[in-house]
Image: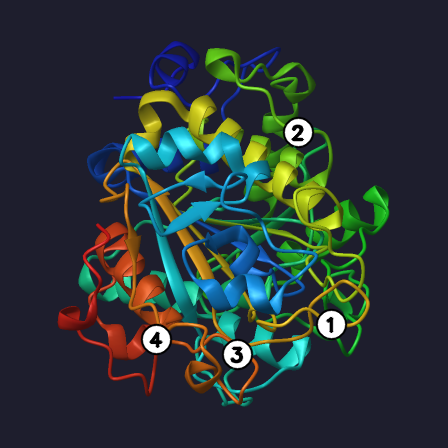
Amino acid sequence: MPITRRVFMRGGAMALVGTAVVPAFLERSVLAQATSAQANGKKLVVLFQRGAADGLNLVVPYREPAYYAMRPSIAIQPNQVLDLDGFFGLHPSMQPLLPLYKSGHLAVIHAAGSPDPSRSHFDAQDFMESGTPGVKSTQDGWLNRALQAEDKAQRKPETAFRAIALGPVVPRTLAGSIPAIAIGNVQDFNVGGRQAPLKPAAMPVAMPLANERTAPAQPVPDSMVSQSFEAMYDSSVDSVLHGTGQETFEAVKMLKSTDPTHYVPASGAVYPKGQFGDSMKQIAQLMKANLGVEAAFADIGGWDTHQNQGSVKGQLSDRLTEFSQGIAAFWQDMGDGAENVVLVTMSEFGRTAHQNGTGGTDHGHANVMFVLGGPVRGGRVYGRWPGLAPEQLNEGRDLVVTTDFRQVLGEAAYKTLGARNLDLVFPGAQLRQQQFLGLL
């Protein structure tokens, strides 16, 4: 059956504004969805909190006496927390997430993190994004390998939007042989660099990251991004995308013709102002456009609270407000589609159990992760709590890791993307189904 304008719109891909011809690339994309994405429909969203979020003040162990002894001015008091289970409670600025927890869609994993002891932002982020703690030679990211493992289990048709990142460059998490694109701004549909074999002249335009990376890379001019996108795909030697670069660019131009500046979130969802809110809105927009998105990535910086962290108010509270509102709005905006979405949050490490002399916290170890989604067994805090007594701390200063972050990501990849080969996704981890927490 030929793809017509009427059929394409009825298929739910998007409302076409002033577009009479559907590019061949998207014809194949829609046909592929009929047998793959629409049959399965599951999508994985990964959010990275860059800068090392203070997990102890995100999900507060408010029945732990040592917590208050170590944090005399920044602790969240028992009458201020949003109770979860009688022992843990959310920071009050995370109120938008409380209904999701109570409805059973949000799960919390405390004392989670990397087994690598590094306190370097750059190294710790690299290890978590590559999925190989302590190994600096890994070339690709765990989420890209999860898509590779999915293909080994059941080959998926390639679409330009299968793996997307909101930002100027493709993150380490999505680097690898599966094509991924970075979308700087859905409203303009300017597309940034991707991790695939490129000729030197066609390398994506991107600013180098600082040695201690605590925030996303700075955006590059729109014109430069657009030019880099066309150049990359035109010059690509990638076996999958070679010869389809122009069609891919046509797809992006067609998306622009849908007038994305007038996108209205569903169900009255209101995204917070700022880069993170925009990223979450754009992920929802692309997913609801049925372009074959399976994996999406976004990040939010500003978690490196060495000074003046605050308690119920302050810089941490401000970050949590934006973070929580963005996630809650995404869930509301996705509507029924949220039932097929799993969202996972992560940060490179936690922060010290003791506050420092400047009203902040320093680089620590274990942290907290959140998993949200329709298939999530939420409404509970997972993981073994190690305690905060002096003899229970890592190196006498940090919360101990009792759940390897790869157990959480592995379960999400296995049950959402169908990535059955966990040795491919997390080489060296020897991760098995029996180690899953039962989140999904």
Residue denoted by label 3: 127
Q: 408 above or below 83?
A: below
For this rendering, which residue is in front, 86 or 94? 86
SS category of the residue bearing label 4: loop
Q: Is residue 186 left or right of residue 92?
A: right
Earlier residue among tags 2 and 4: 2
Q: 131 above or below 34?
A: below
SS category of the residue bearing label 1: loop
Q: Amino acid at mark 3?
A: Phe
| Label 4 Cα crowd, 10 Å radius (few <14 / some 14-19 / many 20+) | some
Distance of mark 2 from mark 4, alpha carbons?
33 Å
Residue 402's disc is: 4
Q: Nearer the viewer, mark 4 or mark 1?
A: 1
SS category of the residue bearing label 3: helix
| Label 3 Cα crowd, 10 Å radius (few <14 / some 14-19 / many 20+) | many
Earlier residue among tags 3 and 1: 3
Distance of mark 4 from mark 1, alpha carbons?
24 Å
Q: Is residue 430 left or right of residue 338?
A: left
Residue denoted by label 2: 272
Q: Residue at x 62, y 43 (%)?
A: 320
Q: Amino acid at mark 2?
A: Pro
Asked whether the beta carbons under mark 2 and mark 4 sit within 8 Å of each other, the answer is no
Earlier residue among tags 1 and 2: 2
Q: Residue at x 56, y 38 (%)?
A: 92
Residue denoted by label 1: 356
Distance of mark 1 from mark 2, alpha carbons?
31 Å
Q: Nearer the viewer, mark 2 or mark 4?
A: 4
Q: Position of residue 121 (x, y in %)?
A: 67, 75
- Quarter of the figure that contains the N terminus: top left
